[in-house]
Image: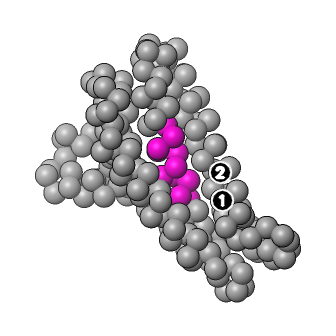
Amino acid sequence: ATMLEEAESGTLDRILVSEAGLFQIVAGKWMGIYLMGCVQLTVMFVFAEFVFQIHLWRHLAGFLIMAGSTSAATASFAMLMATICRTRSQLQGAATVIILSMSAMGGSMIPRFVMSDRMKELGRWTFNAWALDGFQKVFWFQSPLESLQPEVVVLLGSSLFMSVATLLLSGRWRRGI
């Protein structure tokens, strides 16, 4: 959203004239969103540790792996949405529909094990499902770190795909489209 705000206010034009290339600008925005996601997940899980005794410290390595992978996917998704949308209101509307749909299908609102097979299959196309599966492996099933490989590969792969798409589409900022 900050890229859209900067484009609307003319700040982005001034940034693009600077020595920083488009890659550095997009990567810097991505890093800020990524770090915020890591902080938010950490706060939520520390709270869960105090309230529900989830044994966060015992599963710290798994938590860090999943938090980093999940934050990377969400940061890339946020950057892609900001690049695709032309206005802040368009971004807010589209993001609301897409995020709520992904949350419902991915198991964030209703556990996927109670869903029909078709809904479970649709849910596998959301990174919510992969993140939830990974966190469940860490905290519920207490699985070894190696078992997180499918979730981490999908989350980081989707992050890479969305980041490349963002970079390809972000050329519009330079062209002023």
Percent from the top left, x then y, of residue 100?
42, 55
Residue visible at 24% across and 43% down in the picture: 112
Question: Disc 1 vs disc 2: Cβ atoms closer than 8 Å?
Answer: yes
The residue tagged with tag 2: helix, strand or loop?
A: helix
How far is mark 1 from mark 2, CA to CA?
Answer: 6 Å
Would residue 20 appear left or right of 133 to someone viewing this image? right
Query: Can residue 114 be seen by looking at this rendering?
Result: yes
Question: In the rendered view, would you say 98 is above or below 115?
Answer: below
Residue visible at 58% across and 62% down in the picture: 79
Residue visible at 48% across and 22% down in the picture: 60
The residue tagged with tag 1: helix, strand or loop?
A: helix
Quadrant of the image for the C terminus? bottom right
Query: Can residue 110 be seen by looking at this rendering?
Result: no
Q: Main secondary structure of the magenta part?
A: helix
Would residue 173 appear left or right of 38 to someone viewing this image? right
Q: Which residues are magenta?
A: 67-78
Quadrant of the image for the N terminus? bottom right
Q: Is residue 79 magenta?
A: no
Label 1 is placed on what type of residue? Ala
- Residue picked out by circle 2: 31
Residue visible at 58% across and 71% down in the picture: 167
Farthest left residue?
Answer: 117
The residue lying toward the viewer, choosing from 75 and 104, is 75
Question: Where residue 27 is drawn, which disc sits there?
Answer: 1
How many neighbours does mark 1 have within 10 angstroms: few (below 14), some (14-19), or many (20 or more)? some
Percent from the top left, x then y, of residue 116?
15, 50
How many neighbours does mark 2 have within 10 angstroms: few (below 14), some (14-19), or many (20 or more)? some
Label 2 is placed on what type of residue? Met
